[in-house]
């Protein structure tokens, strides 16, 4: 499956980013999400979209808002709104396509995005999914978004899944901001994004 890459002779912003800064912003978004501190989440997402995707300011704010609304639609447990979340992510990926010409199919990208959310929730609440299924769901998303082979993006998925495990433990233990799990989660996200940069920067 392809993403309709734009050949510019140099990596686009999608394939050229600061993995430490991106990891830090996502970490802030994750912590804010579980504390239900939505202004913190929005601030982190604005930075994440700006740093990670390099869209103009209007699209950056719009994209961050769509990601926030998707997160808020997904957040309730067990009665959340997956279709609403997927619709928001489809609109987000459509913005990305307007900017870069990829992903070629925003609806498919959104479907794969929300699918790993589903698998993670099942894993988090011990309702059937395994860590390997979580890794595979992430691999499918990265393969589609970046048009890279599975072996190139599997390390990314493994580090990201490990970060989620640490986050889940933090949530189980009460979401304390002085928890020693949080620096480990942050470090796992840095490794994930460093691996992603190595896989896609060409």
Image (cartoon, helix red, strand yellow):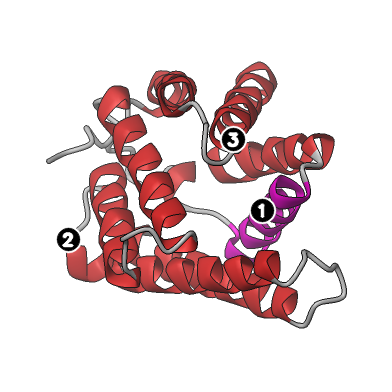
Mark 2–mark 3 Cα distance, whole angstroms, equals: 28 Å
Magenta span contains residue 68? no
Q: Which numbered tag is attached to residue 149? A: 2
Q: What is the x, y in percent for residue 182?
A: 73, 73
Which type of secondary structure does the marked residue at label 1 adopt? helix
Regarding residue 202, the answer to whether it shows in the image is no
Magenta span contains residue 25? yes
Q: What is the x, y in percent for residue 198?
A: 39, 69
Rendered residue at 49%/61% (across/down) = 124
Q: Nearer the viewer, residue 190 or 112?
A: 112
Q: Is residue 198 above or below residue 95?
A: below
Rendered residue at 39%/67% (across/down) = 156
Of labels 1 and 2, the one closer to you: 1
Q: Nearer the viewer, residue 80 or 146?
A: 80
Quadrant position of the C terminus in the picture: bottom left
Q: Is residue 180 above or below residue 77?
A: below
Disc with the residue nearer the chain's start (1 vs 2):
1
Category of crowding for the residue at label 2, using alpha-carbon neighbours closer than 10 angstroms: few (below 14), some (14–19), many (at least 20): some
Which type of secondary structure does the marked residue at label 2 adopt? loop
Quadrant position of the N terminus in the picture: top left
Residue labelled with disc 1? 30
Disc with the residue nearer the chain's start (1 vs 3):
1
Which of the 4 image quadrants contains residue 37?
top right
């Amino acid at each position: 499956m392809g993403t309709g890459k734009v050949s510019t002779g140099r990596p686009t912003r999608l394939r050229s980013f600061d993995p430490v800064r991106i990891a830090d912003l996502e970490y802030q978004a994750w912590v804010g999400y579980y504390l239900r501190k939505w202004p913190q989440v929005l601030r982190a997402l604005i930075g994440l979209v700006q740093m990670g995707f390099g869209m103009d300011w209007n699209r950056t704010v719009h994209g961050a808002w769509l990601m926030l609304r998707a997160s808020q639609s997904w957040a309730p447990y067990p009665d959340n709104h997956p279709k609403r979340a997927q619709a928001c992510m489809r609109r987000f990926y459509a913005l990305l396509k307007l900017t870069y010409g990829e992903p070629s199919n925003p609806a498919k990208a959104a479907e794969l995005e929300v699918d790993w959310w589903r698998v993670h929730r099942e894993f988090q609440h011990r309702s059937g999914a395994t860590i390997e299924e979580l890794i595979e769901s992430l691999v499918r998303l990265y393969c589609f978004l970046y048009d890279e082979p599975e072996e190139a993006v599997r390390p990314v998925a493994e580090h990201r899944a490990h970060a989620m495990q640490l986050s889940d433990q933090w949530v189980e233990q009460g979401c304390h901001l002085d928890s020693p799990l949080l620096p480990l989660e942050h470090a796992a996200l840095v490794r994930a994004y460093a691996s992603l940069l190595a896989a896609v920067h060409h």
